Amino acid sequence: MEHRLSELSTIIFDLGEVIVDLDTEAVLAEFHQLTGLDAVILKDRLINTPYLFQYETGQIDDETFVKEMNSLLGANISYEEFKHAWNLMIKDIPVKRLEFIKKLKKTHQVFILSNTNYMHEDKFEKIMIERIGQSMMNLADIAYYSHRIGYRKPNHDIYQFVIEENSLDPSKAIFLDDREDNILAAREVGLRAEQVLFPDQIFDILKYD
């Protein structure tokens, strides 16, 4: 569904599969090499664990996360090996999307709202410097990363935090994310929200008059 930019004051972007291209298969393949576990088991243990929630809300640090995940995987992966495998998730950040954000910032507030973690932040911010010479935090008006603010999608409190901190009118703010559960939760607190289902769909959703 298209949304006219003239009807909006604030654009809120997720990162993964909206601005940043991801590569889940590369992560699973590397962890398979490190552990011998198959993709189905790895995906379950890497994602469906309370340690990921704790890590992505800043409750545990990098070293603790790696230690706990090694225990969960029955492995003894070094910190550097784990970080390399984990960061294969971050594939690329197309410059045309970043230029679009720059253009939007001339007329709108632009926020980032992402479930992420310190390792991934380190990786994608390095790519940002390579691509356009500035960080994601500096590109957007504000970048809200789950591990820094202590809230995580799709819980309602993360959206309410952004709305309240910026005194937003939710009806004039739109949130773009690739996950349906995150979109539904955003709508439940009054935000406009659209699911991004394919690369560069943001250009189809956000339209100038």
Image: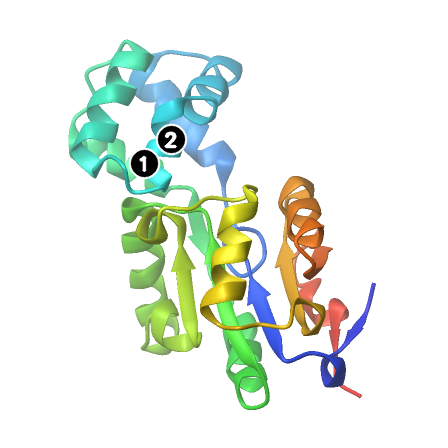
In the rendered view, tell whether residue 102 sits above or below residue 3.
Answer: below
Mark count: 2
| 82 to the left or right of 161 | left
- Tell me where residue 88 appears, x and y as whole percent: 38, 41
What element does badge 1 sit on? helix
According to the image, label 2 marks what residue? Answer: 52
Residue name at image x 32 percent, y 36 percent: 55
Rendered image quadrant of residue 131 = bottom left
- Residue reaching furthest top? 74
42 left or right of 120 in image: right
199 to 168, vertically: above or below: above
Residue 71: quarter of image: top left
Q: Amino acid at mark 2?
A: Leu
Disc 2 secondary structure class: helix
Q: Residue at x 21, y 38 (%)?
A: 61
Q: Tell me, for residue 20, which label it has, or none.
A: none
**Looking at the rendering, in which quadrant would you find the N terminus?**
bottom right
Q: Position of residue 83 (x, y in %)?
A: 25, 37
Residue on which disc 1 sits: 55
Q: Nearer the viewer, residue 204 or 174?
A: 174
Q: Position of residue 192 (x, y in %)?
A: 72, 62
